[in-house]
Amino acid sequence: MPPCRMSIGSFAKGSIARWIDRLSPSCLFFLAATSGGVALAYGELANARVLMAPVVPNPGYLQSVRDPTFGTRFTRITDPGRPLGSGVSCDLAYCTHRYSSSQAWNADQSLLLIANGCHGFCFLDGQTYRPLFHRPMANENECEWHPIDPATMICVSPGAIYTWAPRTNAATIIYAPADYGNLQFGPWKGNPSRDGNRLVVRANNVAGKQVAFAYDIATRKKYPDIDLSALPGTNASCGISPSGRYVLCFQKSFDDRDTAFVFTLDGVELQHWTEHHRPGHGDMTIDADGSDVYVGISKSYPDRYHIIKRRLQDGLVTDLAPHGEGTHASLRNINLSGWVFVSYSGTQAEIALHPHWAPFYQEVVAMRIDGSGEIRRIVQTHNPKSDYWGETHASPSPDGSQVIWSSNWDHVGGPVSDYVSRLSWPQAAAHE
């Protein structure tokens, strides 16, 4: 069979990058010309090179264009400073999804949530990105999509855990304790377990001490308190692992280090990662061997500014990418196992001066979390560093077919819009 007639799925037991390496130069040219640059987008980290982003005009609102370097089609889905219809309007400065580790789409990807700059929650059609409806939401209430039920969000207010159906605006109280106050979902870094049953709440107990505890929605069971006030430093956030087996808490120590603690559901300490941010700015998933792992950016030696994976149960570290300008890692692709989506900042001039760094700047890159070095370069974001709201914060949909990301589009301090890249994943890439 001629190589150019092979489907990518022909090598279901081998990597996409190895499949591409087997193709003839004429077939590589054919692929790049006809399939949106797949020969350039897929590859091995060891062979990746710095690619200068061409000057590209900012797409119009709801305009779909193709990334000229990687061939990925993307759409600008918000328009800061303008009303978008159906009660949805955006602030002038920014109009974006909430965060890289917060799922923007519901379980069936029929709804897409825009939370920053929307004066509440703005819901878009998850496929066409047209505005559907707006819901007011108090700033102190935190909600995340249920990972299985597309109609439901899991929310925490200062006084209760509750479920909420955005379309009908109906809420159901799950747990409203009289002896705890200031309940928080994380704060802002929480996600439910993979089955949607468990979460971790940070709160103040009746004595005024700050504690965290796991809660099981299905069984209405509250697990024992973890006394955060007894840990060194101050708490930044706590969350449940995807399997629902562990509680991960981040503490800022008095010498300005961000360390992490891993507990059982019953509050027994298993791990204390004493290094600063090793890793941080990341997300959790279930690895191929069934273990819970955290993937993010290390800010400590021996792997400072590398992308690393760390296993919760024993702290084992796997190096995924070398020193670079990675800023945020997302694993919201809960139904596309084995890949992490990394947002890179920086400039072409900076990266070109450091040939041993990861060769990415202002780019979203998906990479295998098995340490093999297989990557997929998704889109160039045209997003020079400005402030927090202007950060890319790339976050994939549950099946990885869409990735939402933010950009000021080459204007430092300019309006920040959201964009969505569309991806197809050959069987070999999605199910190895």
Image (tube, grey):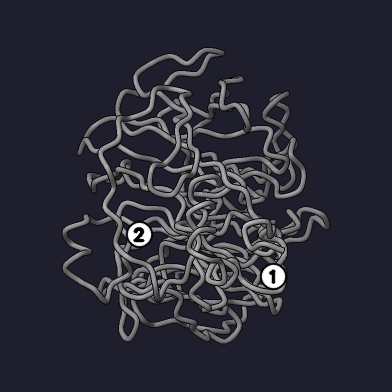
Q: Measuring 38% from the left and 76% from the top, which residue is drawn there?
A: 232
Q: Secondary structure at mark 1?
A: loop
Residue 287 is drawn in which quadrant?
bottom right
Q: Is residue 410 above or below residue 77?
A: below
The C terminus - image quarter:
bottom right
| Residue at 30%, 84% in the rendered image | 301
Q: Nearer the viewer, residue 209 or 195?
A: 195
Does label 2 or label 1 sit earlier along the sequence? 2
Q: Amino acid at mark 1?
A: Glu
Q: Residues within 10 Å of mark 1 (few under 14, many from 20)?
A: few
Quarter in which the N terminus is drawn:
bottom right
Up-down relation of residue 163 to residue 254 (above or below): above
Give x and y (percent) for residue 409.
Answer: 29, 36
Q: CA distance from mark 2 to mark 1?
A: 27 Å
Identify the mark at residue 327; answer none if there is no mark.
2
| Residue 69 visible in the snapshot | yes
The amino acid sitting under disc 2 is Thr
Label 1 sits on residue = 432
Specify the quadrant of the image occupied by residue 203. bottom right
Percent across and percent down for residue 130 are: 57, 22
The answer to whether residue 316 is left or right of residue 12 is left
Disc 2 and disc 1 in contact, CB within 8 angstroms: no
Side (left or right) of 271 relative to 266: left
> How many C-alpha atoms fall within 10 Å of the one at disc 2: few (<14), some, or many (≥20)?
many
- On screen, residue 257 versus residue 201, left or right, reads left
Instruction: Find residue 370 and report its horizontal and vertical position in percent.
Output: 57, 77
How many discs appear?
2
Residue at figure coordinates x 16%, y 68% from the top left? 353
